[in-house]
Structure formats: structure tokens, C-alpha cells
Image (spheres, rainbow, N blue to C red):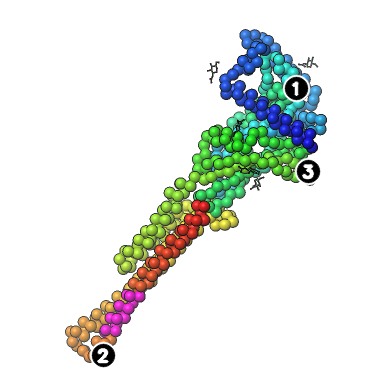
Amino acid sequence: MVKSLTCSYLFTMYLHWLILLFSTAETLNVSETELYADMDCNGHPEIYRESYTTIYEFILNFTNSKETYKRPFIDGYPSFVFVDMYVTSIAAVNEKAQSLSTQVKMMTAWYNGIPLWMYSKQCGITRFQASKEMFWTPDILIKESIKTDYGTTPSPYVQLQMWEFSVSIDILTLTTACRMDLYKFPFDTQICNITFQSAVHTNKELTIDPLSKAQNITQDSKNLLAAQGEWELLLINTSKAHATVLGDLQDVLVYQITIKRRPLLYVINIIIPVFFFIVLDVASFFIEADGADKLSFKVTLLLAISVLLLMLNDTLPSTADRIPLIGVYCSVIFSLIGISILETILVNYLMAKGAQRRSAALMETTAAVTGRDDSLPDSVRDENEMNFSLHWVGVARITDVAFFILYIITIIAFLSGLGKHWIS
Ligand SMILES: *[C@@H]1O[C@H](CO)[C@@H](O)[C@H](O)[C@H]1NC(C)=O
Ligand SMILES: *[C@@H]1O[C@H](CO)[C@@H](O)[C@H](O)[C@H]1NC(C)=O
Ligand SMILES: *[C@@H]1O[C@H](CO)[C@@H](O)[C@H](O)[C@H]1NC(C)=O
Ligand SMILES: *[C@@H]1O[C@H](CO)[C@@H](O)[C@H](O)[C@H]1NC(C)=O
Ligand SMILES: *[C@@H]1O[C@H](CO)[C@@H](O)[C@H](O)[C@H]1NC(C)=O
């Protein structure tokens, strides 16, 4: 076990060196012949071609004799496979389908057992591209995959490195299942897993390890990120785990991708308009309290909110465990406006009743003044009617003011309570 771990560690170190060599040679614009100046075949294309042919023949000989399609073993140790995955774009996040679409660059390196180093003196050829079909390739699959496609034409080659390693690089378009918690939508952060594991091999036959450190993967992904639209990539973390396949342990490499939504669009489109509707509703208390105008104004507000609720319905999944706070926000404000409409109707009713009484009283008083039936009890009754009418109007006024104060307190309490949960 310890030996296996040491072995694995050494291979990792070695691979880092390899990758570094292979990337610096490209980025620093140093040609191989400059790196290996003493083995310069420049100006002798025939020697170069000859070396190349020899190496190719060697590889052919080797793969023929060692059964190409057989997984390479080192003295009974597992095949060491190393994976690096960089997220190059976050194409879409589908909350309703609970899926994440990304474009990733996946680099897979594995031990191949072909001692190419024997030919390193040949014109400084340190790596060799050969057809994928000649070799065993690791059967790494993605557990969460709903759909995996090549982002470009799949490369038909693997690169054989001098020190018995193969490297293959693929650009993949992934759609993966990702359980999202939309409680804090649109101020939410999601963590999506992308899990690599062998389709059939147990960890006695194949190990999967990350090639680079998590910080470097995060940093490099951020540098590579072409498009991230609504989402910001926060972190990519890797961890190793184990799964069981038919009772045997299997190596699993988990990439945890943490992404954060940029909420501005939803703030502008939903949260601010709904907030203004409630402000308008409060303002409508100052409209002259006689009936139809005020009522139709408030009903319009209610309709406007229901349009926004429909919009929201298109985004949020119906299966959420907890109702997203934005849903609570919209529906509570919807209900508050609904209640304030009821209150307006009540006040209107009281006012109307008061007005009715008053006009009745006025009519009778007028009749009394013109003097047809002026008896004392009647005028007393008129006074009573007048008081009664004033009483109704008073009740209406008090109801209105009391409701208004209660309404404002409720709104402030609700919004501050919600805000504390939401933004924190
Ligand atoms: C690489 O070097 C060659 C000559 O050494 C030069 O012509 C070429 O422009 C360089 N490429 C870059 C990308 O710097
Ligand atoms: C490949 O195998 C053939 C026949 O066994 C042998 O003659 C040739 O030298 C080998 N080539 C290399 C590069 O090993
Ligand atoms: C993602 O992977 C981590 C680490 O292995 C694990 O703890 C977590 O439960 C996984 N999340 C999901 C949704 O599978
Ligand atoms: C990885 O990141 C560390 C610091 O974050 C840096 O020193 C190191 O050079 C990076 N390694 C590679 C291979 O980029
Ligand atoms: C990455 O994951 C490991 C193991 O799951 C954990 O210990 C570590 O804190 C994580 N790193 C970050 C930056 O979250």
C-alpha cells in the first residue's frame, strides 16, 4: 500500500515536471531543437525523418508484442490515471431541469509502459503523436452526465511522452445533473459536482488522481473562461472518494464547481418593480377616498404583480423543497395589496352608507324647513340621522388611518425580516 502510494506520488511529481516542460516549450516559444541543441538535426531533414520512422516502428513493435488493447500493468500495480479538468465556459444553468451546461477542457494522462526515452537521443524527439486506436485508453466516464459531446472534433491522437506516459486532451460540452437549492434565488450560490470514475475498473486496477492542485485549476479556469454570462465561477475544488461497483471499491475523483449568480437582472426585473408596486399601493391611501378610482388603481397593481409572478413561474422549479424567498416576497406583497383592496372596499362601503344617511337626513330636514309637517320629534330624528351619518364616516376614517399605520408597520417588518434571510 505504502509502496503503491509512493509510486503514485512519484508519478505525480514526474508528470508535473513533464507537463511543465511541455507547456513552457510552447509558451516560451522555445523549439525542441533549442532545448536539445546538442542533438540538433536541423538542416538534416532526412535524419529527422529517419528517427521518426524508427520511433514509430518501435512503438508499433512494442504495441504489437504487448497486446495493445490490454491495460498496462506495472508489477501488479494499478494503472495510474491523472485527470485535470478546466471549466472554459458556463453555457447554461437550467433551474427547472436542475442541470448545468459547461464547456470543459479535460486533460487525461496515464502510464503506458512504452519506453520512448530509449530514443530521446534521436534529434531531441521527446514526444510522439500516434493514433488513439493503437493504444489502451482509460475508460473514464462522468457520473452526473446527462449528455456529453465533444466541443470540437475529437482529437484522433494521443501524445506519447518520453517517460512512458500518454496524454490526451479533449474539449467536452457537458450537461450534468446538479441539484440546486433556489431558496435564496437570485442571491444564490450553487455547488455542482462533476465526478470522474472508471466504467468497469476497480481501484486495484485503475486509480484516478488530480494532476494539478485545486487552486491552480480554479485560477487557470478563470483565466480560460470565455463566457460565463449570468454566473460567476467562484471555486473549483477536487476531492477523492470511493464508490462501489459490484462489491469492489472504485476510485472516484470529484470536481466541485461553485458558481454564484449575478443577481442584477432579477433585481431590476422583479424585485424593484414589486417593491415599487407596494410603495404605490401605500401612496394610493392618499387618493381622495371616494370609490372607484382608488379601487381600480389598486386592482391594476395587483394585475401587474401577477404578470411578474408568471415570469417567475417560468424560472423556478416546482419541486423546490423550500419555497424560494422570492416567491414568498412576491406572494406576500400580492396578498398585502389584496388585503388593502378589501379594506378600500370596506371603507368605501362605510362612506357610502354615511353619505346615504346624510342625504336621507338632509332631504327630511329640507322637507321640515319648507314647513309642511314641522313637529318636534321629527327634527330630533333628523339630528339623530345626521349624527349617525357622521358616525359612519368617522368609523370609516378611523378604520382607514388604523389600517394605514398597521399596513406600513407590517410592510417594514416583513421586508426587513425577509432581507435578513435573503441577502445574508
Ligand atoms: C517564435 O519564434 C519564431 C522564431 O524563433 C518567430 O518567428 C515567431 O514569431 C515566434 N512566435 C511567437 C508566437 O512569438
Ligand atoms: C521491429 O521489429 C522488427 C521485427 O521484429 C525488427 O526487425 C525491428 O528492428 C524492430 N524495430 C524497432 C525500432 O525496434
Ligand atoms: C459532491 O461531492 C462532495 C464531495 O465528494 C459530496 O460531499 C457531496 O455530497 C456531493 N454533492 C452532490 C449533490 O452529490
Ligand atoms: C500553482 O499555484 C501556485 C500558487 O497558487 C504557483 O506557485 C504554482 O506555480 C502554480 N503551478 C502551476 C503548475 O501553475
Ligand atoms: C476542498 O475540499 C476539501 C475536501 O473536501 C476541503 O477540505 C477543503 O476545505 C476544500 N477547499 C475549499 C477552498 O473549499
Label 3, label 1: how far apart the Cα atoms are: 32 Å
Q: Name the amino acid type tagged 1.
A: Pro
Q: Is residue 9 visible?
A: yes
Residue 258, position as x, y percentages in the image: 58, 43
Task: Check the picture and name the quadrant holding the N terminus.
Answer: top right
For the point 73% across and 40% down, the residue is: 251
| Rendered position, 376 above or below 389 | below
For the point 22% across and 91% down, the residue is: 375
Q: Which residue is mark 3?
A: 248
- Secondary structure at numbered mark 3: strand
| Rendered position, 197 above or below 37 | below
Q: Name the amino acid type tagged 3.
A: Asp
Q: Which residue is mark 1?
A: 115
Q: Is residue 137 visible?
A: no
Label 3, label 2: how far apart the Cα atoms are: 103 Å
Query: Who comes first in sequence, dot 1 or dot 2?
Result: 1
Mark 2 surroundings within 10 Å by alpha-carbon count, few (fewer than 14), some (14 through 19), many (20 or more): few
For the point 56% across and 43% down, the residue is: 259
